[in-house]
Image (cartoon, rainbow, N blue to C red):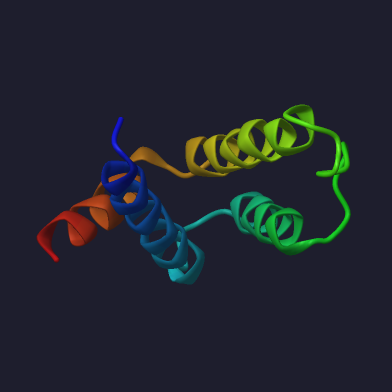
Amino acid sequence: MKLKEIKDNAKKYLELCKLLYTDSRTPKITKIFLWITIGYALSPIDLIPDFIPVIGYLDDMVILPVLLYIAIKSVPKEVYIENYVKILKK
């Protein structure tokens, strides 16, 4: 996957998270996972410190996508599809 594709996908998922968070049909547990994900991404504290070569950054590359996956999978399918279509139309 090229860097531009990764950047574009990241933008889409950030927009999707924003739409899901503001949608009243989104379960509270999803909103909690979204906050945890944002908090972990912005937190200076990591499970494995970044100064440890390779492994330090690897935890961010594994944990953040897993948290996003859990949050998105906890959304009802209709709500997910409706919000995802909104992003694709932009």
Q: Position of residue 86 (x, y in %)?
A: 20, 61
Place residue 68 in its image quadrant: top right
Rendered view: 44 above or below 79: below
Q: Residue at x 85, y 35 (%)?
A: 52
Q: Residue furthest left?
A: 89
- Where is 3 relative to 53, above or below? below
Compared across the picture, whether 22 is left or right of 58 comes to left
Which residue does the image show at 35% across and 43% down from the upper left?
6
State the residue in front, 38 or 6. Answer: 6
| Residue 90 image position (x, y, % from top left) | 14, 66
Locate residue 74, reporting x and y percent: 54, 39
- Image quadrant where residue 49 sits: top right
Write the residue at 40% across / 51% down. 10
Quarter occupied by the N terminus: top left
Find residue 25 and report its horizontal and vertical position in percent: 45, 60
Q: Is residue 85 left or right of residue 63?
A: left
Seen in the picture, residue 81 relative to 55 is either above or below; the reply is below
So how many labels did they put on this image? 0
Q: Quadrant of residue 39?
A: bottom right
- Front residue (pair 59, 27): 59
Residue that appears at 28% across and 48% down:
4
Q: Nearer the viewer, residue 84 or 43?
A: 43
Q: Give the residue furthest to the bottom.
A: 22
